[in-house]
Image (cartoon, coloured by chain):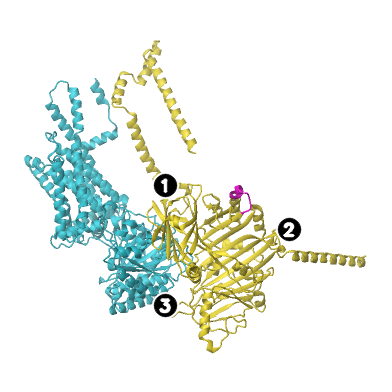
Chain colours: A yellow, B cyan
Amino acid sequence: MVLRSRPIFSLLLLFLSSYGFSTAFASGSAIEGGEEDFSEELLLKPLPDRKVLAHFHFETRAPRTPSYGRHHHLFPKAIAQLVKKFHIQEMELSFTQGRWNYESWGGFEPIASSNAKPPGVELWAVFDVPPDDVDASWKNLTHSISGLFCASINFLESSTAYAAPKWSFRPDPGSLRYGTLPREAVCTENLTPWLKLLPCRDKAGISLLMDRPSIYRGFYHSQRLRLRSAKTSSDGTHSSIILEQTLTVVLHPDSQKMSTVNSREPTLQPSWSMSSLFGKKISGTCVLAKSSTVYLQLDWGVVRELKNLENGNQVLGVASIMEESFVSNPAFVLSDKPDKVIREVDSRSEESAILYEFSVRKHSDLGPFDLGFTWKTPVVWSCPQLPLRVSRFLMGSGNERGAIAISFRSARAREGLTHAKSMGESCKVDVNVFQVVPWYIKVYFHTMKVFVDGKPLAVSDIIEKIHVSPSEDKVSPGVLEMILKLPCTVDSAAFTLEFDKGFLHIDEYPPDANQGFDIPPAVITFPTFHVNMHFGEDNLSKKSAVLSRFQENIPVRSYTEVLLVPLTTPDFSMPYNVITITCTVFALYFGSLLNVLRRRVNEEERFLKSKGKRPSALSRLLSKLSAKLGGKRVVASQSSARSSSFISLKLILKIILVAGIAIAWQYFSE
Amino acid sequence: MAESETSKAKPRPIVRLGTLLISHSVFVSVVCCVSGVLALLLLPILAKNTYISENALMPGSASPMLSNQDASDANRLVNDLSELSSKSNNAGIVQRLVGRYISNLGAEVGYHQFHPDLSRFHPLHFFSVPDTGIVQENINCSCHGVNVIGIVRAPRGDGKEAIVLVTPYNYTNSGLADHLSLGVAYSVFSLLSQVTWLAKDVIWLIADSQCGEYASVAAWLRDYHSPAFSGFGADNAHTCDVIATHHDVKENVAMDMSSPDSFRRAGTMAAALVVKVVDRNEPFEDSLGVYAEASNGQMPNLDLINIVNYLAVHRQGLRVKVRKLFSLLDTKWLSFLAEILESLGSIARRLNPQWKFGIPAADYVDGTATLLGSLYYQALGVPTGPHGAFRDYQVDAVTLEFSPRHYSISKGHTEDFILRGGRLIEGVVRSVNNLLEKFHQSFFLYLLTSPSKFVSVGVYMIAFALLVAPLPVAAASLYAKANRLDTSLDDAKSFSPPTATVNELVISAGSWRWISAVKKVLIVHLWGTTVALLPYFISQTPSLTPVTKLAVWGILSLVCLLFPYFFLGSPFAGVSGTEGYKHEWALLKSATISAAFIGLCLMSVINFAMAEFGALLMVPMCLMVQPLKLDLRAGTLQNLARAAINLVLAFIGFPPATYYILKSTFGSFDGINIENFWCWVESLWSWNSATYLFLGMVHLPCWLLCAQILLRS
């Protein structure tokens, strides 16, 4: 019995396993998006101002198939439910601390365009629901995300906090909602739930590097979550959801303090390694990850400098940095040998960025992977700049009115205007401005003034397209969307908008009202400029999520500063004093006014006279009593009694009238 | 029957109280005035110790991080500057040196070129902040300066707020003290460029003080808050023919920077500190002068002064001083008063140990001198330093003036001094950096009686209120008396039969008699306004010496005075028809007093200190005034004394006389120089001081009316 049963069991096992294989095979071969996959990547980049950019990129991909059911292998269930419930087509949530320095960290490059975010929280989402339901979905979404990420995103629920940009933020029409919370503080409590969405959390793989003290010590910290759907098959029937989680930090390598401040020659850039930046090393990959790669990017600026160095050193015959063999170069030393050197192919110029690829699996075989970068010669370079440097500031002072000004200055960068200038005199730079203004900043859009190169211009000359939705008190914020067409030769441009400062109701003030109120950053997009890097090899994008993102054609985008507007604030510290004195003043005023209005001249005298004629109430009562006792009828007092009752009736009528008016007033003012 | 009834009708208590006060107006006036002056003199005793009201400030809770390294770096800058200034006089080189020092710290550098505002009287834009349109045509071309600006961005901050450090510096002509002031600020700035705790950006403004310390800071603030987009270069080239120098400076400066034009900005300013080092040869110890008065007596939040004082005294061991009237320190009456108060205090303490209002005589004298100094500088309405420019933009600012003893700045000890000064400023910056909201907790209206003692508005209001209170009472009583007397006169005159109708007529005539007095007062006030506006036109005409300007002003004022006399039917000879009334002057006096009361109350809102001084001068003058003829006719000793006092008061009350008398008693008196008065007035209006308006529109008309009553026949 036992003997006989074993072959059957093994047969069953064989059958089952072959079935399993075949299904696995089938699903693998059906489409590439059919399987959930996860990849983890880290991009490191030295920055010109002695800092290092670390960009973590985790991507989880799940097919959007009904047959898949509710269960996922890798894709976080919380997010999947969110997508399903609120019909999210696309969504992006970012938590940022610090400001992206567009001047020294670059603006005209993929990371800056898609990962430089305004301080605080920014959330936008595109819904796949009928237009009427978008707001409801947004409200529910904010609450869900708020709970998911331990942040007060639910403040974006109120209609005063979010806007529906038509075309300036993204080309997507319709169901886009956008909101920011500039004052949201970002800390580990937001990072932990974000890490929970990763299959390996921060227990294995690249995310092991996320040592909280070191990543929060940085100069910029932006944690982003992006959901999008991609069509995986050509006919569009199959689509998959892609969850992209990125953490961008700018760190300062701990090096010895700059000792010679005064020296004129450039100092050596600090050398760094993963362990010196993060205090940790990568000890292995996340086993669930399809790929686990570390890239080291050198900007075109560095590459150019290095080439110059090489040209100088050509007599020595040192190997080029471009070579795969990579023995040594005059500028820097890498602690590990890269697996691959990827060159950006740029049609516009000779120099282009270089990426060194390190496969974590390979490098962490022998021990923890700790990529080190040591400079040998001082190199000074600059990052690709935005076509126009944008800054926004407040004008005016006082609590009554002010103006918002956005100024553009040409950066004269390589990609910027030299490129555009070649197109001729008539060329124009498109600048797309999207600005949300809270309702208590009452912007007068008709006061818009535009100055180009110091000359005031008519608004219609420079604005190609504009869409304005004025704010409504306590209901919706003001939204300004416009496309400015500036001449390519522009040196500086500015536009100003005047506003009045509104008054808030006392319970609308936040706890720290005296700090002032924030105006969320304006989003400036340059639709004619695109950041995308081309790499020689075609299949790179299939292999690497970061590189495929780099290859996408995104317009250059930048965010302006958050502004702080001081508004009038009541004295919160002593409300009772204020209430008491106000009430006293009102009582005095209305009391005396009513007194004056009500009393007729000499009435008091007449009253006294009549009172003298008429017996007082007590005496009347006494006389009545005596009359009763005496059995006589009271004649004189009857008329007065009637009149008094008449008066009281009148009085009651009056009171009722006043009360009625008050009730009606209350009712209509609600 | 009816009469008995009306007598029974008692008016309300408040009315009864009013009539009681009015009927005893002389007594009330004397009591109120005396107690008002006494209350003012008691203020130093009532002063409270300052305390840090905003908990978030936490001054001194962190140990200073400024190290010897920072100080020695700063010292190197000081040495470089001294070397440069001994070699050449080129401003551009110094600017570049400072710019390079800043950029080596990793901070942003900016250069701001400006022409300061021409100080000009704008009668119609008196209280308003000048907007760009006015500024454009109001540029002083004779002076051209370049401010150097360094900005440290807070590493993790959101850039919404900024703290400003200002060091006025004259690039072409500077001494060791000026270099040291840059050194102190640089040491702090270099520290702040490295620290991680910074939440607000820090702006360091090295203001070019060639055109005046205030002007350069004001020009920078103007461009910060209301920039002219229609081209700095273009328009200024039109208004000023200084294109050549412009380019020169640009070339000089452009060498070190990427974009010379861009005006660097940080967010909303939270607070500003002006740092200055002055070589006054302090004999004993390093001291720190705190200047806070901005235009029209506006003060920064008391918390800012508190943290400076706390850190300077308790952490750095500096002696903190605020300005006082030194001439008061050795006056006899004050020390006498101080001793009386001290003995009163000790007696009170003997009676009940709980009563602790006595303070030592020396403290009292010092406190009074400081208090009066505080009042004086607030009353002038002229800012006491570059910090005043910030107050116009609602930024709390204070000037810290280090005056080191000679030893501290002698060779080899500067580093120590920089360390001390730098640590103080670091502490203040750190406190302000801690601040989540803007300054709002503590007082804005206060008077200092010492660096650590203050009198708040609730207390010092009392003195003013007491001084002013008798004015309406006296006006009412005068009016009532004049009416009553004149009516009785009329009653005596009129002998027509139906008394009731005549009575009513007379009442109506009497009740409208004040109109003429009020008309007179109004005309005189109009005249005062005209006189206040005249200097605007006088100053338009160039090439006049101050003496001639003053003379022209005086003559024109007189002409203006005669104008209504001829054309408006001689308002000063009394209005025809009411000539017969003996008590016409009383009505006029009543109207004058009412006008003075209104003027003083309005002024107390704008500039309290000036209102207080004005009340001290005007209230006795207005209350005492009586036609000299009446007094002389009566001829008793009392009347003669009153006449004499009236004359003295009227003399003191005349604004130029007041100026010279005050100057000779408190200031350095170097002979009556007629020019001085014009210069003083000029400075008042060029600083847009409300004091000037007060003098022109309230004080002078009031004095004229009093003088007219006095000389009435």
Q: Along the line of sight, which residue is nearer the eye, B324 or A128?
A: A128
Pick the quarter of the image with the C terminus of chain B.
top left
Q: Do the residues under discs 1 and 2 have CB atoms within 8 angstroms?
A: no
Badge 3 amino acid: Val
**Which residue bears the numbered disc 2?**
A68
Sequence-earlier tag: 3 or 2: 2
Please, which chain is the residue tagged with disc 1 on?
Answer: A
Residue stretch in magenta: A127-136
Above or below for A41 versus B7 = below
Q: Neighbour class for label 1 at 10 Å: few (<14), some, many (≥20)?
A: few
Above or below for B50 versus B143 = above
Q: Do the residues under discs 3 and 2 have CB atoms within 8 angstroms?
A: no
Sequence-earlier tag: 1 or 2: 2
What is the number of callouts on the image? 3
Q: In the drawing, what numbered circle is on residue A175?
A: none
Sequence-earlier tag: 1 or 3: 3
**Which residue bears the numbered disc 3?**
A261
Q: Position of residue B315 (x, y in %)?
A: 37, 67
Q: Along the line of sight, which residue is nearer the eye, B527 or A260?
A: B527
Q: Position of residue A569 (x, y in %)?
A: 41, 50
Badge 2 amino acid: Tyr
Task: Examine the residues drawn in magenta and state their main secondary structure.
Answer: helix
User: Looking at the picture, do discs 3 and 2 lie on one chain?
Assistant: yes
**Which residue bears the numbered disc 1?**
A575
CA distance for labels 1 and 2:
60 Å
Q: Extreme bottom residue here?
A: A315
Q: Secondary structure at mark 3?
A: loop
Q: Which of label 3 and label 2 is nearer to you?
A: 2
Q: Along the line of sight, which residue is nearer the eye, A425 or B241?
A: A425
Q: Which of label 1 and label 3 is nearer to you?
A: 3
Residue B620 in view here: no
